Amino acid sequence: MHAFEQQDSPQTLAEGVAEYYRLNPGLAQGRGMSPEAQEFFRCHDAVHVVYGCGNALNDEAIVKLSSLFGSTGGFGILRGYQLHESLEIYKKLRVIDVLLSIVQSVFFLIPRTLVRCARQRSRWPWNNFEQYLRIPLRDIRKEFGIRVAHAAGPGTSL
């Protein structure tokens, strides 16, 4: 488990995002992307870090749901998933991996993530989070009532 994925990570949001990009050097991070895509992925990648998600398909499902129901972005973020830069990512996925992720999502990830989002104290600011860049992730998660994707231990099933 990486530092930003731990519930009580002392990393700041900026440090967590930097770690996420170091672990995923293939991410575009703005190279050749439209300004709209750059903004979408900046916000999307911050959600990865705040909710403690890697980039496995199941984690991507959690990020999508958390963006929709746990952030101020709401259903408006769906436009970002329709950008050609997003669609290019989907084209690289294997059908069997997508199908397995869907099965796991329907019976486990979707219900758990929706419950966790409903239990948040407030919604994560989708595109207006600069004031949190120097705040430790553990403090952000405490403030918003966010449980990381892979929280473990007593009482962490939901």
Image (spheres, helix red, strand yellow):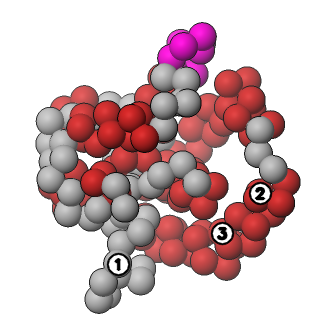
Q: Is residue 113 placed above or below 76 in the rendered structure? A: below
Q: Residue at x 60, y 61 (%)?
A: 58
The percent coordinates of residue 134 (x first, y second) are 14, 36
The residue carrying mark 1 is 152
Q: Position of residue 69 (x, y in %)?
A: 49, 56
Question: Which kind of residue does numbered mark 3 sit on?
Answer: Ser
Circle 3 crowding by C-alpha within 10 Å: few under 14, some 14–19, many from 20: some
Q: Where is residue 23 in the image (x, y as percent from the top left)?
A: 43, 41
Q: Which mark is residue 105?
A: 3
The label shown at residue 13 is: none
Image: magenta residue range: 30-38
> What residue does disc 2 label?
98
Q: Is residue 154 above or below residue 9?
A: below
Q: For the N terminus, give its image quadrant.
A: bottom left
Hey, what amino acid is under mark 2?
Val
Determine if residue 121 is in view: no
Which residue sits at x=19%, y=47%?
11
Task: Specify the quadrant of the image occupied by residue 156.
Answer: bottom left
| Residue 144 covered by magenta stretch | no
* Residue 34, percent from left and from top: 59, 12
Task: Determine whether, in the image, residue 14 is placed left or right of residue 113.
Answer: left
Please indicate, yes or no, whether residue 151 appears anywhere in the rendered image. yes
Badge 1 marks a residue whose secondary structure is loop
Left or right: residue 1 versus residue 99 is left
Determine which quarter of the picture holds residue 9.
bottom left
Left or right: 20 as drawn, with respect to 130: right
Instruction: Specify whether residue 36 is painted magenta.
Output: yes
Quarter placement of the C terminus: bottom left
- Judged from the image, the secondary structure of the residue bearing numbered disc 3 is helix
Q: Which circle's residue, 3 or 1, is located before the other in the chain?
A: 3
